[in-house]
Amino acid sequence: MTQVGLLLSLTALATILFEVPTGAIADIYGRKVSVVIGFLLSAFFMLLIPSSNLFIIIAAFWFLMSVANTFSSGAGEAWMVDYLKKNRKYSLMTTALARRHVFIYAGITSSFLISGLIVSKYSMTWLWYIAAAVLITLSVFLIVFGKEDFRGKKPKSIRGLFGQNLRVSIEGVNYSRKHPILKFLMVATFLTAIVSMMNIVWPPFMSELGIPLMYVGPAYALYSLVGVIVPNFSSPIMRRFGGERKALVAITTLILFSSLALAFSPNWQVFIALWFISAMTDVLYAPTSISFFQRYAKSNIRATLGSLREMAFGIGGVFAPVIAGFVADTYGLRAVIILAAAFVLPIIAIYIKVNEGQENSHITKE
């Protein structure tokens, strides 16, 4: 578990170090180029990971794979949002991002089921090969069919590339730092990563409550199935609450109470019921928070700002596994869940603090 935690921290470290520079690449050369590069490089290092049983070698390839992922993370969202704006479908942004999460969770559900079959018939090595093949296929698909109308100012030399990359990165940092809303959303993203520490203890907590390990995988598959269904209702829910900000206040409040209820589950039957209820709030939070963030992102540095958001999450992701491990070893698994729930409180406060006047006066027009 220490090695697993270290790998998760390496992923977060790669995010911190490379999200902004790779986001700037997307803003200079185009989102499509950045996403394809990210997929192909990720596939390459996936193919290398099963070539060794030495942890140090695996960790090195894992870190490089995590660096490759930074090329596609912020760029994918920016590509989608810019496409909607160009085709005058900006009002569908929340719906589109929710649909994106539906497909993500559909893939996760399938992976939990298919991976078990693959491992039982072949070996775990094949999981890496199949995942790499999927990314290579996706890259070819995007190259052939991906539509993007991008007109970035491409530098004429390597020196110019680094100079422009630095300028775009600095512009993104300054824009988010001075923006009356984005600066708070960056803090909320960091705290969200800290809250994710509870995800690390779910499997052992299930075991502690008496759930057989063979049922943990199917339980996660059903959990992911919630993510396929619920995001389809994110737009109606947002309208019912009167906008993304108010919806986020309600969603994070529900996350707080559901997390505390999970921590004090008396048995596994109650836990499973509460876990699926909490899944509904979890899968609603991501598309709604991303949509709220993108509403204030400046178009010409949208990918950089998205990468800054990923970097803020990555900083929290470095600390979350370490904190979770220490608290679990010292005070028990329930203490990790309670501590994570405590960090939801300042997130709620941030969404309450962002007032309607700021929302109306700073919406990006680009």
Image (cartoon, rainbow, N blue to C red):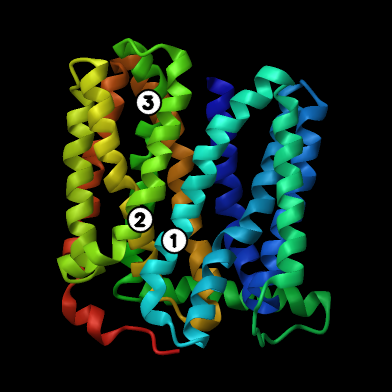
Tag of residue 202: 3
Q: CA distance from mark 1 to mark 3?
A: 26 Å
Q: Give the amino acid type for the residue marked by disc 2 in the picture.
A: Pro
Instruction: State which tag comes first along the sequence, 2 or 3.
Output: 3
Q: CA distance from mark 2 to mark 3?
A: 22 Å
Whether residues under marks 1 and 2 lie with C-beta atoms below 8 angstroms apart, the answer is yes
The quadrant where residue 200 appears: top left
Residue at left offset 77%, top offset 52%? 136
Q: Which residue is mark 1?
A: 99
Q: Is residue 269 above or below residue 83?
A: above
Residue 29, quarter of picture: bottom right
Query: Where residue 236 sits in the image (x, y, percent)?
Result: 24, 65
**Relative depth, front residue between 2 and 258:** 258
Q: Nearer the viewer, mark 2 or mark 3?
A: 2
State the SS at label 2. Answer: helix
Residue 158 is tagged as none
The quadrant the C terminus occupies is: bottom left
